[in-house]
Amino acid sequence: GEDVEQSLFLSVREGDSSVINCTYTDSSSTYLYWYKQEPGAGLQLLTYIFSNMDMKQDQRLTVLLNKKDKHLSLRIADTQTGDSAIYFCAEGSGGSYIPTFGRGTSLIVHP
Amino acid sequence: SQTIHQWPATLVQPVGSPLSLECTVEGTSNPNLYWYRQAAGRGLQLLFYSVGIGQISSEVPQNLSASRPQDRQFILSSKKLLLSDSGFYLCAWTYYGRDGNTIYFGEGSWLTVV
């Protein structure tokens, strides 16, 4: 079945850029998502990208998609302590009701 | 705009007691609705999803059940809770629009079974 893989932890210094990586297996994926979960809260949609796009930028966030390698990344510029959270990658296809989520990457930002 | 409400936010229940978590969505009609469980603050486990009133699909066999009595209402229940039912429960919905089947989550319910 479909699978989404992420590294579990990432530690960066405040002010540096963070890059969170994700790989997926479903070649029919049409939408790819990034969610942020702060402690004790639900998942908040950060951004999404269509599979026919290579890049999407939204303020400090840049999403890169390599469809050939089925690799998705989220770059956070000028990382702040408020960016500390768990980041989930997810993929979905138009024909499925159920997106597939990765296990989440814990981003720890050091002052 | 669409919003999702989930309650209660926190509850502590004894083993063997019943459970009812409720979720409602506002601002849309005929959404797909989901219940997820997240253990130890990590990966999401899909428990149930529903594509319409009275239509429930179960993803894992367990001590829980779900019901959808109204179009925008989704309820997670148990007749007798187990210790292993403890966790963070998330309700979610999808809206098929310009951003595809993007899934939106409620704020979650913390359940501790003691």
Image (cartoon, grey):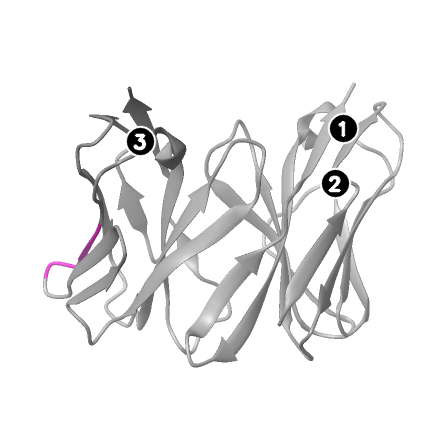
Give residue A84's position: percent from left, percent from top.
38, 31
Q: Are marks 3 and 1 on the same chain?
A: no
Q: Earlier in the sequence, mark 2 or mark 1?
A: 2
Contact? badges 2 and 1 (CB < 8 Å): yes
Give residue A27's position: percent from left, percent from top.
23, 68
Distance between the alpha carbons at the discs numbered 3 and 1: 29 Å
Q: Which residues are magenta?
A: A69-74
Q: Is residue B109 above or below residue A27?
A: above
Q: Residue at x 21, y 55 (%)?
A: A62
Identify the image quadrant of residue B98: bottom left
Q: Residue at x 40, y 77 (%)?
A: A94
Residue to which mark 1 is pinned? B82
- SS at badge 3: loop
Q: Is A70 within the magenta?
A: yes
Amino acid type at image mark 3: Leu
Crowd class of label 3 (few under 14; some 14 to 19; many from 20; radius 10 Å): some
Residue to which mark 3 is pinned? A8
Chain assignment, label 2: B
Q: Main secondary structure of the magenta part?
A: strand
- Residue B63 is marked as 2
Give residue A77's position: percent from left, percent from top.
21, 44
- Residue B44 is marked as none
Chain assignment, label 1: B
The answer to whether residue B13 of the structure is visible from this angle is: yes
